[in-house]
Image (cartoon, rainbow, N blue to C red):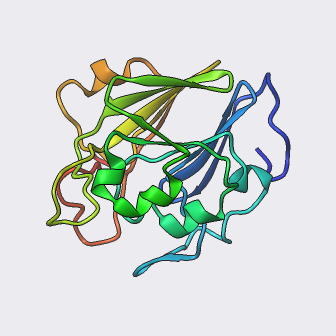
Amino acid sequence: MSATAGPDDRAFGLRWLGHASALIVDRGTVILTDPVLTDRVAHLRRRTGPTPSGVHVRHPDAVLLSHLHADHTHLPSLRLLDPDVPIVAPWRAVDGLPALREFADRLLPLRPREQIAIGKITVRAVPARHDGRRWRRGPQLAPALGYVVEGDRRTYFAGDTDLYPDLADHVGPVDLALLPVGGWGPTLGKGHLDPPR
């Protein structure tokens, strides 16, 4: 999918933007996952090419936020988006990250197993096994989520998660799975997948 090409109602497309950021196009609906649209988040630097750009990067039909860590809910990147873009987020995300109040009129909070229609697709929240808090010692107020995007294809966006016994039952069969398979340090820690897992 080109950065400037318009979505086609008959086409499915995926464009990886780095880290957990991707554009999914299904049935002409454009979904942006965990946007990081800058060259850096704290000590993490972009190594996947230039900063993402293009009309669909800044003006998707909706954004999916998997959890509140700064490399997944990146406030400066959310501010770069069109101000009317809806943001699907974990239930109680504002409680876990009060700075999200600036986006409160656009937030669409979901609990695991809830779903919402966006354009011509459905987005269903699924549980993730990951510490989704913004700060390591803060209260656990908002769950980490994955999402299944259902249109002509079924795409699973995991955010960050580890394997857990009912994962396949929650997600169901998919055509494409966007899975986290690496980290930025020598060990990933709990709540992450690595290539062997």
Residue drawn at 52 percent across, 54 percent down: 103
Name the spot of residue 169 as percent of width and height, x first: 29, 18
Camera sees residue 194: no
Answer left or right for 47 relative to 9. Answer: left
Q: Residue furthest bottom?
A: 43
Name the foreground residue: 184 vs 20.
Answer: 20
* Residue drawn at (38%, 18%) of the image: 172
Quadrant in the picture for residue 68:
bottom left
Q: How many marks?
A: 0
Measured as percent of width and height from the top left, residue 142 is found at 27, 46
Query: Would residue 177 be found to the left or right of residue 113 on screen?
Result: right
Closer to the camera, 154 or 37?
Answer: 37
Establish if 165 lies above or below 67: above
Q: Left or right: where does residue 59 sit relative to residue 42? A: right
Q: Is residue 105 visible?
A: yes
The vertical placement of 144 against 137, above or below, is: above
Q: Residue at x 34, y 23 (%)?
A: 113
> Which residue lies at the image location 84% right of the left edge and 52% below the top edge?
4
Q: Considering the image in quadrants, where does the N terminus appear?
A: top right
Q: Quadrant of the C terminus?
A: top left
Which residue appears farthest toward the right when viewing the image? 5
Closest to the observer: 89 or 49? 89
Query: Quadrant location of residue 25?
Result: top right
Where does residue 9 sit, x and y in percent of width and height?
Answer: 80, 24
x, y (%) of residue 82? Answer: 70, 55
